[in-house]
Amino acid sequence: MVLIRTPEIWNIPDSAVTAEKLYWNRRQFIKTIIGAGIGASAMSLVGCQNKPQSAQPGELTALEKSLDLPEIESVAKNPAFQKTGRPITEAKVAGQYNNFYEFGANKRIWLDAQNLPTKNWQVEISGLVKNPRKYSIDELKTEFPLEERIYRFRCVEAWSMVLPWIGFPMKKLLAAVEPTSKAKFVSFSSFYDPEITVGPAFHLGSLPWPYTEGLRIEEMANDLAFFAVGLYGRDLPKQHGAPLRMVVPWKYGFKGAKSVVKIEFLDKQPATYWNTLDSREYPFESNVNPSKPHPRWSQATERFISTGPGLSWEIKETLPYNGYGDYVAKLYS
Ligand code: MTE
């Protein structure tokens, strides 16, 4: 077992976290796409960067502010999802260690994501449902009782965390909107506004914005599938995908679309962002599987980022379905 510690959680050295040469370098990726001027679908991309979004000491106040959100009161802790066998990751570590490509492919996504406008947010439910409608976030929060679930989170790039989400099971939304018998798949789209989501990669026409993800309807109906509106007892921070994001803990992290504005029920498998870019590296299903290596690295182990006086991480064995096989293995037999 390898245990590495650094003294300050807001200043995580790259070298400590990243087995650099194994992974795509984000800046290189941008340069290559711009330089090549070709379709990004021809490129090999990283679905889930593991470079830290290190807040420098001077930025710590901004980081703390981004996490200092209203508390969500009277939330029941779901007893089935309190223990993960691992400690919860520190909020300030998780809150500066994000992927949100709409806001950039650099090390300051957590800061740039503060430009996300979350007021008067609407989520449109459409397609093959009996009750299509638009929900405001307040309507979602009042119509579906909120609960806390502590889930393991596993990035496709072999790092992991444990996060205490607040939200509601996706199956509650299914019961409300009543998909028709023709609905077999569900597509989830993230917020998209070329005036606001202006990360360096954003204006490259060949990238398939908006960010979309998809599930089979049976996956959405599974007990584990969750919509988060909060984290660490408070409203969801913008860098984590406020005000509503998907959480599907048996799948790699890129399957969890952030800042969802549209949910569409379909009879065919939808195109999704990473799968459109590279279907070999990012298959539609993408369940956590230690015995199925990524084309460029092993998935047998992971760097578990926990907590402590400083950042610490340990090499742990990756579990099939991220340890949630009892809930979901039946979907894939
Ligand atoms: N959703 C959107 N809209 N845009 C993104 O770039 N990145 C995905 C996923 N959802 C992403 C997204 C990836 S690759 C990961 S690993 C997780 O968000 C990261 O979630 P976190 O930043 O809350 O840890």
Image: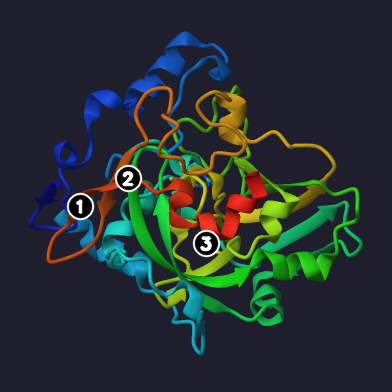
**Figure check: 16 above or below 44:** below
User: Closer to the camera: disc 1 or disc 3?
Assistant: 1
Q: Residue at x 24, y 65 (%)?
A: 61
Between the C-alphas of marks 1 and 3, the distance is 26 Å
Q: Position of residue 145 (x, y in %)?
A: 64, 81
Q: Secondary structure at mark 3?
A: loop
The amino acid beneath tag 3 is Ala
Between the C-alphas of marks 2 and 3, the distance is 22 Å
Residue 84 seen in render: yes
Q: Which residue is mark 3?
A: 242
**Figure check: 132 above or below 46:** below
Q: Residue at x 52, y 61 (%)?
A: 242
The amino acid beneath tag 2 is Trp
The amino acid beneath tag 1 is Trp
Q: Which residue is mark 1?
A: 313
Q: Secondary structure at mark 1?
A: strand
Q: Is residue 192 left or right of residue 159?
A: right
Lower position in the chain sequence, tag 1 or tag 3? 3
Instruction: Verify CB contact (< 8 Å) between mark 1 and mark 3.
Output: no
Q: Quadrant of residue 23?
A: top left
Q: Secondary structure at mark 2?
A: strand
Q: Quadrant of the C terminus?
A: top right
Front residue (pair 203, 216):
216
Between the C-alphas of marks 2 and 1, the distance is 9 Å
Q: Residues within 10 Å of mark 1 (few under 14, many from 20)?
A: many
Q: Which residue is mark 2?
A: 159
Q: Residue furthest bottom?
A: 74
Q: Residue at x 74, y 52 (%)?
A: 217
Q: Quadrant of residue 207?
A: top right
